[in-house]
């Protein structure tokens, strides 16, 4: 039995943050597939009672411990392993600042935007999708400016801030209808640097549920 189980599914950039971290630190882990799209398992009373009262993924299980919120999972794994851990109080707070910005305004908008374009039936209201796209463009520009001056979000060393911020950024451009890397050259170079880390893997290779079975 692997030390960690990660409740997740392949299309989720929120889950990818946790899956990537587990892989990068060389943890002994296995994914547990949650049927998000067809069954909405995360909303079932059983899931809320036994796995996560918030009805969200990812959830990391280690023995009796269950953790949700990818930022919490990243922090826990970094502190436990000593890897990708921000060093010192200033960097710890700086990482937290970027993780919160990411959760709300970078991948926090990209996830729902992609969902409304790609998976929602019927597709999302164009006004809502357009609103999200405007917010995304603004947030990606902020990230791109940050990465113009640094190899990684906090400086010259990769940390959990990077692992959080790449959440949705390796999914194919067609899924977004625009090419994030082509439009943001500093983000593109940074994505290559993160991709070069030992044990990096693509979300579709790391988590179950891709491709989705046809209806
Ligand atoms: N801030 C959370 C976001 C988690 C999240 O929204 N996960 C999605 C899957 S990508 C989810 O489970 N949504 C269920 C719902 O909102 O009903 C994190 O970083 O873990």
Image (spheres, grey):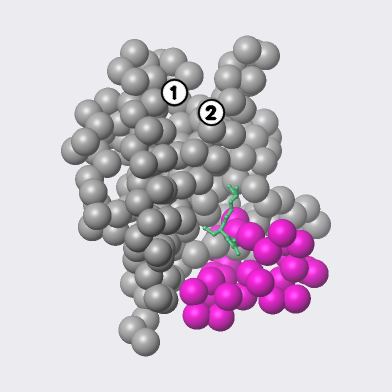
Residue 16, horizontal then vertical, whole percent: 47, 51
Q: Is mark 1 within 8 Å of ligand 1?
A: no
- The residue beneath circle 1 is 153
Farthest residue to the bottom: give it: 215
Image quadrant of ligand 1 equals bottom right
Seen in the picture, residue 91 relative to 203 is either above or below; the reply is above
Which quadrant, please, contains the C terminus? Answer: bottom left
Q: Nearer the viewer, residue 161 or 195?
A: 161
Residue at 33% across, 84% down: 214
**Residue at figure coordinates x 64%, y 20% from the top left:** 93
Residue 77 seen anywhere in this rendered image of the structure: no
Q: How many marks on residues?
A: 2
Disc 2 is placed on an element classified as helix
Task: Please state if 121 lies on the left or on the right of 79 as rendered.
Answer: left
**Residue 197 has which mark?**
none
Looking at the rendering, the stretch of residues picked out in magenta corresponds to 30-58
The quadrant in which the N terminus is found is bottom right
User: Which residue is more in the foreground, 122 or 177?
Assistant: 122
- In the rendered image, residue 90, in percent from the top left (x then y), is placed at 63, 12
Q: Is residue 35 magenta?
A: yes
Label 1 crowding class (10 Å Cα cut-off): few <14, some 14-19, many 20+? many
């Amino acid at each position: 039995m692997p030390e960690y189980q990660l409740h997740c599914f392949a299309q989720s950039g929120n889950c990818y943050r946790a899956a990537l971290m587990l892989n990068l630190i060389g943890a002994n882990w296995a994914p547990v597939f949650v049927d998000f799209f067809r069954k909405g398992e995360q909303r079932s009373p059983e899931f809320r009672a036994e796995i996560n009262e918030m009805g969200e993924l990812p959830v990391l299980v280690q023995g009796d411990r269950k953790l949700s919120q990818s930022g919490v999972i990243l922090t826990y794994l970094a502190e436990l392993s000593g890897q990708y851990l921000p060093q010192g109080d200033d960097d710890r707070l700086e990482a937290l600042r970027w993780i919160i910005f990411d959760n709300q305004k970078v991948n926090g908008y990209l996830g729902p935007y992609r969902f409304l374009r790609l998976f929602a039936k019927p597709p999302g209201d164009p006004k809502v999708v357009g609103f999200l796209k405007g917010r995304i463009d603004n947030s990606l520009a902020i990230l791109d400016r940050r990465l113009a001056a640094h190899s990684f979000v906090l400086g010259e060393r990769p940390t959990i801030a990077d692992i959080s911020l790449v959440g949705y950024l390796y999914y194919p451009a067609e899924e977004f209808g625009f090419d994030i890397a082509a439009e943001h050259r500093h983000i593109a170079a940074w994505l290559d640097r993160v991709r070069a880390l030992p044990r990096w893997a693509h979300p579709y290779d790391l988590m179950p549920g891709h491709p989705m079975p046809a209806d």
